[in-house]
Image: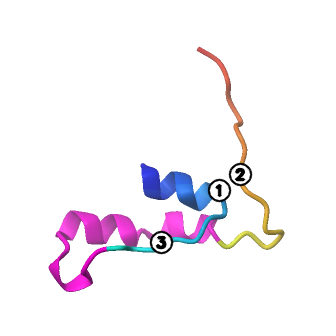
Amino acid sequence: MYFSLRATMAAPLIAGSDIAAMSDRLRSVLTHKDVIAIDPDALDKQGGRIYAGG
């Protein structure tokens, strides 16, 4: 979830772990194409809340 949140905030997506030693689950999160596609916004603007209900 933290990785997805960083992507919507137009923040750099940096992995601070050893790629060769990371688990398959972590690798799948860090290489998720849909999440990565959100990060490089053409207007360089971060995402915002679209729903605020209970």
- Residues in magenta? 17-39
**Foreground mark, 3 or 2?**
2
Residue 33 position in % (x across, y down) = 47, 71
Q: Disc 3 versus disc 2: distance between alpha carbons?
A: 17 Å
Q: Residue furthest front?
A: 16
Mark 1 vs mark 2: which is more N-terminal? 1
Q: Disc 1 versus disc 3: distance between alpha carbons?
A: 17 Å
Residues at discs 3 and 2 in contact (Cβ within 8 Å): no
The image quadrant that residue 15 belongs to is: bottom left
Residue 24 position in % (x across, y down) = 19, 70
Q: Disc 1 versus disc 2: distance between alpha carbons?
A: 6 Å
**Would you say residue 4 sits in the magenta stretch?**
no
Q: Which residue is mark 1?
A: 9
Which SS class for mark 2?
Answer: loop
The amino acid type, in three-letter code, at marker 2 is Gly
Mark 3 vs mark 2: which is more N-terminal? 3
Please tell me the numbered disc located at residue 47: 2
Front residue of 53/2: it is 2
Which SS class for mark 1?
Answer: loop
Q: Is residue 7 left or right of residue 19?
A: right
Front residue of 13/53: it is 13
Magenta span: chief secondary structure? helix
